[in-house]
Amino acid sequence: MKARVTVMLKNGVLDPQGEAVRHALGALGFDGVGGVRQGKVIELDLAPEITEADVEHMCEQLLANTVIERFDVEML
Amino acid sequence: MRAAVLVFPGSNCDRDLARGFETSGCDVEMVWHKDTALPQGVDIVGVPGGFSYGDYLRCGAIAANSPICSELKSHADRGGYVLGVCNGFQVLTETGLLPGALMRNARLKFVCRNQILQVATTNSAFTSQYTQGQELRIPIAHHDGNYFAEPSTLDVLAAEDRVAFRYLDNPNGSQGDIAGVLSANRRVLGMMPHPERACDPAQGGTDGTGMFAGLAKILQQEHA
């Protein structure tokens, strides 16, 4: 079984890297990009007994820093 | 006085930090990240700068979960002193020993320069040798030093006088110009600037020596 974890900065936390990407897109002539948020995707190969709740614990303890980031777990 | 300096794969200021402690007369022992105990009788643990574990995942995140860091947490819980510099500050926020987080610099650039700091409180062992508002010239060298905390956390830090240093001419976008913060018991300090790089005239300045001297003085009083 696999899980896909998406980690994003919380809304309201300034994302300077996303802002830089937005500026670069504008410089390339791509108009109409109002905002860019950059995050990361982590894929996990899991033993069958691992549950979504287990993966959420992994996120809270290591994969995300919940001071600044939120996460989303997708079991595949 | 006994100091321990943690060493992670990718630490690169560990020996500088050891030298900083030695300037104030501390015996220093280096402790490898896989060790499961701190040396007996250690008064202060230094968490050095560098790029522990290559900054993988997030700066300091993997180091914060290494075996020695559970000992670090126990040491702090017992009221032991801890000094985290640069990547060490990032490790301390990741362990939860200090509030907030260090994010990518607002201008996205690695900043390496001499930085003027202002002493924001003298009420700690680390800052007791300075005067309130004193300006110090201390090097900074980081890519992720942009201090972030929830407004409620910033209020607590202000109310409890736990901001140790603030930047003049904020180099990285840190909220409230915060360069270093103290724990609630004032014995854990994390800071992005490198006082250990300002401990010898050959380094271009000695404004960092006051921190190590202040620590030594308080430790001597506690041992007396």
Image (cartoon, coloured by chain):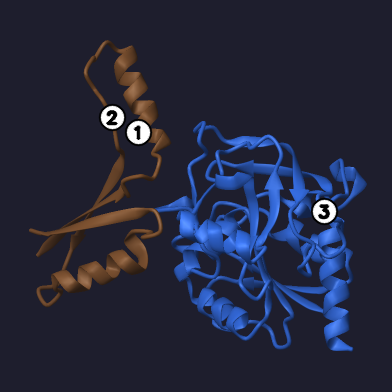
Q: Is residue B150 left or right of residue B138?
A: left
Q: Which chain is brown?
A: A
Q: Are tags 3 and 1 found on a single chain?
A: no
Q: Which chain is blue?
A: B
**Image spot of residue B100 (x, y percent):** 50, 58
Q: Residues within 10 Å of mark 3 (few under 14, many from 20)?
A: many
Tag in front: 2 or 1:
2
**Image spot of residue A9 (x, y percent):** 33, 47
- Amino acid type, callout 3: Gly
- Look at 24% across and 15% down and name the residue there: A30
What chain letter is assigned to the residue under label 2? A
- Callout 2: SS: loop
Distance from disc 2 to disc 1, alpha carbons, whole Å, reads 8 Å
**Image spot of residue B129 (x, y percent):** 87, 62
State the mark number for residue A18.
1
Asked if residue B121 is positioned above or below residue B134 in the image, the reply reads below
Distance from disc 3 to disc 2, alpha carbons, whole Å, reads 42 Å
Asked if residue B74 is positioned above or below residue B139 in the image, the reply reads below
State the mark number for residue B208.
3
- Amino acid type, callout 2: Gly
